[in-house]
Amino acid sequence: MYKRPWWRGQFRQRGFRVTVPRETIIKVLSDRKKHMSVEEIFHEVIKTNPGVGLTTVYRTLELLRNMGFVSKLDFGDGFSRYELTIGDGSTHHHHLVCTGCGKVLDYSDFAEQETALIQEIERALNKKYNFVINTHQIHFFGLCKDCRGEQNEIGIV
Amino acid sequence: MYKRPWWRGQFRQRGFRVTVPRETIIKVLSDRKKHMSVEEIFHEVIKTNPGVGLTTVYRTLELLRNMGFVSKLDFGDGFSRYELTIGDGSTHHHHLVCTGCGKVLDYSDFAEQETALIQEIERALNKKYNFVINTHQIHFFGLCKDCRGEQNEIGIV
DNA sequence: TATGTTAATGAAAACAGTTTTCATTATGAG
DNA sequence: CTCATAATGAAAACTGTTTTCATTAACATA
């Protein structure tokens, strides 16, 4: 799972220190290979290092984001999620959100066709709006099998 | 700008009351024709109706969302945004977010090509993951012209 | 048009995820 | 090994959002 500390050099190079909490947090993200909420990351981290504080998790995630190693996801349910964008097991993918139970699935189908269109759109937006685009996110919202019973999505009377 | 109260019938039909705060909020969204943060909506609403409370704005937006008239957007900056999905001036579009200043632009280029691909993806996801997809969002993140000076994106020392 | 039921409202308090503060710890350069 | 200081953890502060609850007003009925 966790092969080489690819990120250590990046840290030192930019003047950031390599610390135990940072190592643990990156390892957790690297092992899971999926978007995780801050709470999930925190709980996983303290399994190995009970001393690490929630504050440090937030700070480290923000640092990793600024370094471009992690991206932040917001599906509007009040929880920020993070996932590694480089390193082991980070493939280009998007998300499928169930508006019933909040479950989020990754999918990476249609990568080639999507990439082609996205690149075309990025070029056009760059030109038209004078934006340099770094990344994109595609979210699909719907209902999973379990949430599609006879009850309707939201408990409106 | 604001032609017909297309939504009144929908309200009554579903047993919801037509009230002044609700009318005002829908009018504000309808006039602006763009995603707005809750605070923006609130400030615009109290220009005409100073009595309306922030709580009611939240509640009405949630109601409109449940009725499918409005969709909620989250770009990860801590502010929920809302935009009309039906009625006057609501065209299919996506968003371009500047990670420097937080500015959000709408764009609706490449609608046909995108729609074709999206429908194909939706069909596939439906089949593979047993999801019924209602909607999707595409966010591009990048830097606008103004935020692309000599200073780097985020104030990392 | 008047009346009564009850959905909707506004203000304040509560809430929850996140950020800041600050004294303490520990990384890593010399 | 020593030291300067970046990083940390705990608690407090912060902020967008939700809940509570007494009051108001929409609208079905008469």
Image (cartoon, coloured by chain):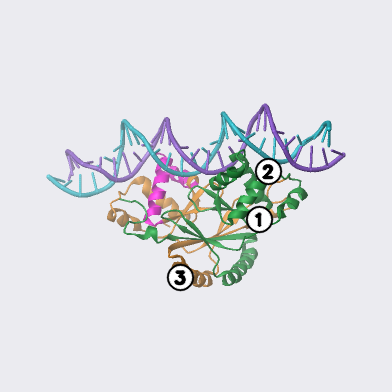
Chain colours: A green, B orange, C purple, D cyan
Precedes in sequence: disc 1 or disc 2: 1
Q: Which span of residues is magenta-colored?
A: B40-69
Tell me, yes or no, whether the highlighted magenta stretch contains residue A96. no
Which image quadrant: the N terminus of chain B?
A: bottom left
Q: Position of residue B125 (x, y in %)?
A: 47, 67
Q: Residue under mark 3: which chain is it in?
A: B
Q: Residue under mark 1: which chain is it in?
A: A
Q: Which residue is mark 1?
A: A2
- The reply to whether callout 1 and callout 2 are in contact (CB within 8 Å) is no
SS class, disc 2 = helix
Q: Which residue is mark 3?
A: B123
Q: Which residue is mark 2?
A: A20
Q: Is residue D19 left or right of residue A24?
A: left
Which image quadrant: the C terminus of chain B?
A: top right
Q: Gap in Å between the C-alphas at discs 1 and 2?
A: 15 Å
Look at discs 3 and 2 and give the one toward the viewer: 2
SS class, disc 3 = helix
**Is disc 3 surrounded by few (<14), some (14 to 19) or many (20+) residues within 10 Å?**
some
Amino acid marked by disc 2: Val
Q: Gap in Å between the C-alphas at discs 3 and 2?
A: 45 Å
